[in-house]
Image (cartoon, grey):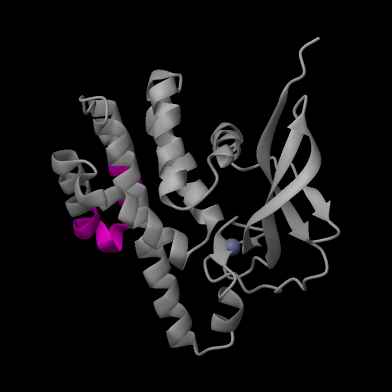
Amino acid sequence: MFIIFGTRGIKHTISESPVLMNSCPNCSNGSLVNKLYRRWFTLFFIPVIPLDVVDRFYECNNCKSAYNEKIKDILNQSQAVQENVQHQARYTYARALVAAMTHMSVIDGDFAAEEEREIMDAIEQFGDVKPELMQVMEQVKRDQNKDNFVFNLLNEARNELSAEAIMNILAQAGVVLLADGIIDKSEENLMKEYLIACGLPKDMYRTIIDKLQTKNIAEDEIEEVKPL
Ligand SMILES: [Zn+2]
């Protein structure tokens, strides 16, 4: 008999941490729930042994936006400060997303029209910073990850936002990989390189694929009872 073992990241709700009611800066009426990602050792795809915590963050129960835990302090500040932080966070997210999408598109040496359309759709969601995002796309098209340009943008997002935001970026960017229907081995390796570049364990790859496939609607969650 084969024994199939592995590791994967699972999202948990930190039940003893208070929910920040109706305070999502993105959608205003969503509540922020404190969550964490823990790596689990799995046997036959069933999590059996809890391993380390990868990231703690807040997630909106309405729009699913993910925030660095610092959001708790920011919510106590003035409206102007909150708006400024939110604007900066959106910009960081968008730049990392466009860089990763473009990089994934050009890595095989061919920038398909379908891929360009996906990237332009993403850019259109952030209309107010469209010129800056077009610049990011042009630079990655031309120089790819030269001087770690793409990795640095992802790292910036990791520091400013959360690991969950990075995985949302990679799942959203992964749409261009799925343009041809499958994710091949070299594309899988690229995703793992992104994770490692951001200081995240490469077994979070599975979590990204799950997000990509379910579009983050169905969640495989377990209540976190005893944080280590
Ligand atoms: Zn929200």
Residue 28: image x %, image y %? 58, 70
- Left or right side of 119 for 209: right
In this view, the residue in front, 202 or 32, is 202
Residue 175: image x %, image y %? 43, 33
Q: Tell me the quarter of the image containing the C terminus.
A: bottom right
Name the image quarter holding residue 131: bottom left
Q: Tell me the quarter of the image containing the N terminus.
A: top right
Residue 170 is one of the magenta-drawn residues:
no
Residue drawn at the location 33% of the way across and 50% of the way down:
151
In this view, the residue in front, 106 or 33, is 106
Residue 39: image x %, image y %? 68, 46
- Left or right side of 138 for 119: right
- Left or right side of 209 for 193: left
Residue drawn at the location 28% of the way across and 35% of the way down:
117
Q: Is residue 53 above or below residue 26?
A: above
Residue drawn at the location 55% of the way across and 45% of the way down:
201
Which residue of the protein is positioned furthest toward the bottom in this rendering? Answer: 78
In this view, the residue in front, 3 or 45, is 3
Report if residue 184 is visible in the image: no
Name the image quarter holding residue 179: top left
Query: Ligand 1 is located in which of the four quadrants?
Result: bottom right
Residue range in magenta is 119-133
Report if residue 72 is visible in the image: yes
Q: Give the total number of marks visible in the rendering.
A: 0
